[in-house]
Amino acid sequence: MIKSFNTWSNKWSKTRRYRKTMEFMSSSIKVNSTVLDIGTPNKFSHIMAENGLKVLNTKGEDLDQHPEAVAQFETEIATAFEIFEHLLNPLGVLKEIKAETLFASIPLSLWFAKAYRNKNDRWDQHFHEFEDWQFDWLLEKGGWEIVRREKWTSPVFMPGIRPIFRLITPRYYIVEARRKK
């Protein structure tokens, strides 16, 4: 019973996050815009395509070792949704992006939970979990100026004190940034 409930809660949370991300982007982008979605094709890449965007993805390169992999794409827009927390050196990637607009989101550091770690998959873990000011600073150092930002919670429907905290504590932070001239 709990396992199926957790699966439903997780699916609901992702659907909510995808909807909020698309709403955030839609006020600033035009249908048929070409987007570099940093990372391999994923559920949200398909959602962007279904909403009329031309989506290109990186090929799964280790972006810590090869940040220049993103430089081969010259697009109007770049997206990096829940990518930078997995990198040891996200600054290298930020400097290599060849787009004028960047939409990026991260999970925020939560005072009541440790950084996410999947012991069965060395890529599926967070090296960084940022506070909002840290991510802002990283973007600035990478040559970006934030023009809009938003935070939202990520409730889970389970008993316990941490789920209560997740109802009121923002978990996700999304920004729209422009390349500094």
Image (tube, rainbow, N blue to C red):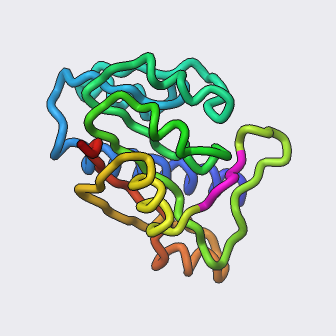
Given residues 44 and 160, the one toward you in this image is: 44
Magenta includes 134?
Answer: no
Image height of 54 relative to 112, above or below: above
Pick out the residue farthest to the front.
181
The answer to which image quadrant residue 111 occupies is: bottom right
The answer to whether 59 appears left or right of 36 in the picture is right
- What's the residue at 49%, 48% (across, down)? 14
Pick out the residue farthest to the right.
119
Given residues 43 and 92, the one toward you in this image is: 92
The answer to which image quadrant residue 179 occupies is: top left
Labels in figure, total? 0
Q: Main secondary structure of the magenta part?
A: loop
Q: Is residue 1 visible?
A: no
Given residues 41 and 78, the one toward you in this image is: 78
Image height of 102 relative to 148, above or below: above
The answer to whether 113 appears left or right of 42 in the picture is right
Which x, y percent locates residue 31?
Answer: 17, 27
Figure quadrant of the N terminus: bottom right
Figure quadrant of the C terminus: top left
- What's the residue at 46%, 40% (across, down)? 94
- What's the residue at 48%, 25% (across, down)? 70
Which x, y percent locates residue 158?
Answer: 62, 70
Which x, y percent locates residue 144?
Answer: 34, 48
Q: Magenta part of the protein: which range? A: 125-129
Which x, y percent locates residue 45?
Answer: 42, 28
Q: Is residue 116 visible?
A: yes
